[in-house]
Image: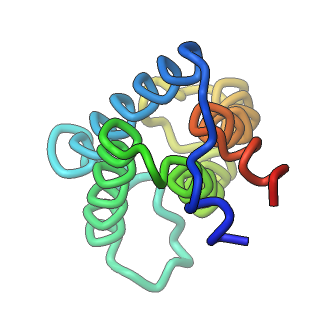
Amino acid sequence: MLRDITNTPPTTTPLQNAGRWLLGTFMTGAGTGHLSFARESFQAQVPDWLPMDKDTVVLLSGVVEIGLGLALLLGKRHRALMGLGLAAFFAAVFPGNLHQYDQRISAFGLNTDTRRLVRLFFQPVLMGWAMWSTGAFKALRRT
């Protein structure tokens, strides 16, 4: 299945390309924030049950975000695979969003229960955006 996705990159529309560029830019910027100016806010989202140092988790996830963001911006042949990878990454960090909601942690302007709750519903939107903008949905239908 992965071979089918990576052999022939799906054709994407100009709107999908713009969406991919926007998402790639956002991911690269967010990853940079993990490593610098927003590091403390990101640490507040790391669940307490995770058996790693919160700062290490933030740094590692920042490096992953920068890598995925750059892959969206620069990659062509494996863009559908990168879309699947980014969707999986968004799923993997979702427990941090749940933790922020459950523990009522204010960070990134999410200072009410309503705002934190709305953010939970935005995560699937990000997953869909990653898959749509990279042609991953189309690639999966071909397999």
Image-based side of 12 in relation to 124, left or right: left
Q: Is residue 126 above or below residue 75?
A: above
Residue 99's x, y, as percent? 61, 56
Task: Identify the image's colour scheme: rainbow, by chain, secondary structure or one colour.
Answer: rainbow
- Residue at 56 percent of width and 61 percent of height: 6
Q: Is residue 54 above or below residue 97?
A: below
Can residue 129 be seen at all in this image of the molecule? yes
- Residue at 33 percent of width and 29 percent of height: 25
In this view, the residue in front, 70 or 37, is 70
- Residue at 69 percent of width and 51 percent of height: 102
Q: Is residue 111 above or below residue 59?
A: above
- The quadrant in which residue 53 appears is bottom left
Q: Is residue 86 above or below residue 137?
A: below
Determine the residue located farthest toward the bottom in the rendered image: 51
- Residue at 45 percent of width and 50 percent of height: 77
Residue 1's x, y, as percent? 73, 71
